[in-house]
Amino acid sequence: MLRLLPTHTVRLFCSRSARGISSRALATRASIQIPKSQRAIVYETHGGPLLYKEIPVPQPKPNELLVNIKYSGVCHSDLHLYKGEWPLKVKLPLVGGHEGAGVVVAMGEAVKGWEVGDLAGIKWLNSSCQSCEYCTSGHEPVCSTSVISGCHQDGTFQQYAVADAIQAARIPKGVNMAEVAPILCAGLTTYKAMKESGAKAGNWVAIVGAGGGLGSLAVQYAKAMGFMVLGIDGGKDKTQWAKSLGAHEVVDFTTVPDLPRTVVEKTGGGAHAVINVSASATALQQAFAYVRPTGSIVLVGIPGKPIIDLPILPTVSRQLKIVGSMVGNRKDTQEALEFFARGLIKSPVKVAGLSELPRIFEEMDKGVILGRYTVDTSK
Ligand code: 8ID
Ligand code: ZN
């Protein structure tokens, strides 16, 4: 059974718990009509037309929230999935997207701890079993039955989306909804990768892909966590952008004559940790040449051709650590959101309409986006 806010209780509900909620959320609660259909971007085949069309509003299952998505970030993972570059089972036709920030408008009968009108985030990890050894030890992203938003089920490139109430993120009241959206994947993922790197305050962390969506946030989380930051990306625009976000040093991989040597020089002996958020296998391969002995290389970006050669002797003799990192758990999510809500992270967003997604994917494919696009689902 679906629990909705009954129309006659709207006034009482608003006056009881409206404190601190943005006016936009309040407006949504006051006009709680849930339409039968909505606008979405749908594709039926990998690489096929991205159709901006009217589709039914989904019904939440007993454990799910129905969230009126206000904004959704556009992640490069959405593009990889659209192109069919990864060996994942993708639902088709599909509504992609996994960085959705919105307002709870309804919920299933088994949901506890949420109210209609709460601000909620829909993430990559839509649900997991909550009972396997990984879910019970804070590693739910590797749960074998996990459901991924915008991959296994329809995601956030629509006006209304569903999410498991346990995995949905609690967005702090009063934050800017367009800006918070990318924190739900790009922010969470890079914050978690930083923790996985084992770097300590004062250490040099190299962010590879520093001008992109994840990179722009990685630079700032790294700085907020007390690391020295070296950003690597291609072209003046991207390196200057990374510098403007707080990188202590930047390197342009398209013009520097000897990238590994330059990084070793600038960091006084190599990066203690390398966080690869680029979608480039070549960039990852190069990291072995400039990571500091005993340092770590954290793999976050997943190129279309996801194989590199592992240089075994240097990895052993220099005692390197190679770490894979995928999004983060619920605790990481709340921590990443708190950094943002405290004003330590400026979300690098450009706002566009949902209908503009095809153009955004084209720009992303060309590698020309500085920071992150977030789409307004009402346009
Ligand atoms: O949980 C995860 N592991 C996770 C979560 C979210 C995203 C992984 N990802 C993956 C995406 O699937 C994608 O493969 O991280 C990668 C980056 O996602 P993004 O930040 O959303 O992509 P982007 O905005 O296009 O930024 C990529 C940046 O990499 C730079 C580009 O110039 C761009 O700024 N780049 C490239 I491509 N080659 C580079 C190189 N050789 C490079 N920067 C430095 N050196
Ligand atoms: Zn993502």
Image (cartoon, helix red, strand yellow):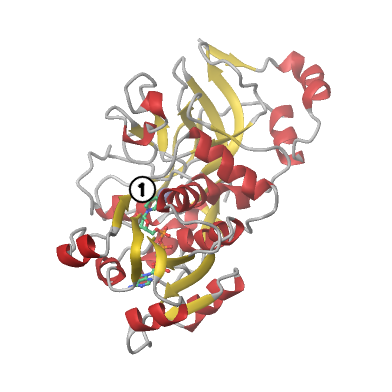
**Residue 158: % across, % down:** 48, 41
Residue at 68% x, 14% y is 6
> Residue 42 vs residue 47: left or right?
right
**Residue 353: % across, % down:** 54, 55
> Residue 346 vs residue 72: left or right?
right
Q: Which residue bears the numbered disc 1?
A: 325
Q: Residue furthest right?
A: 15
In the image, residue 201 above or below residue 145? below
Q: Dot 1: what SS?
A: loop
**Residue 379: % across, % down:** 57, 51
Identified by mark 1, the residue type is Ser
> Residue 317 vs residue 369: left or right?
left
Tell me the quarter of the picture where residue 346 sits: bottom right
Is disc 1's CB within 8 Å of ligand 1? yes
**Label 1: few (<14), some (14–19) or many (≥20) C-alpha neighbours in 10 Å:** many
Q: Residue furthest front?
A: 317
Residue at 55% x, 71% y is 247
Tell me the quarter of the picture where residue 320 sits: bottom left
**Residue 226: % across, % down:** 59, 59
Nearer to the camera, 241 or 289:
289
Residue 373 appears in the rendering: yes
Residue at 38% x, 33% y is 139
Residue 309 appears in the rendering: no
> Residue 97 vs residue 201: left or right?
left
Residue at 22% x, 39% y is 89
In the image, residue 120 above or below residue 12? below
Number of residue marks: 1
Nearer to the camera, 121 or 192:
192
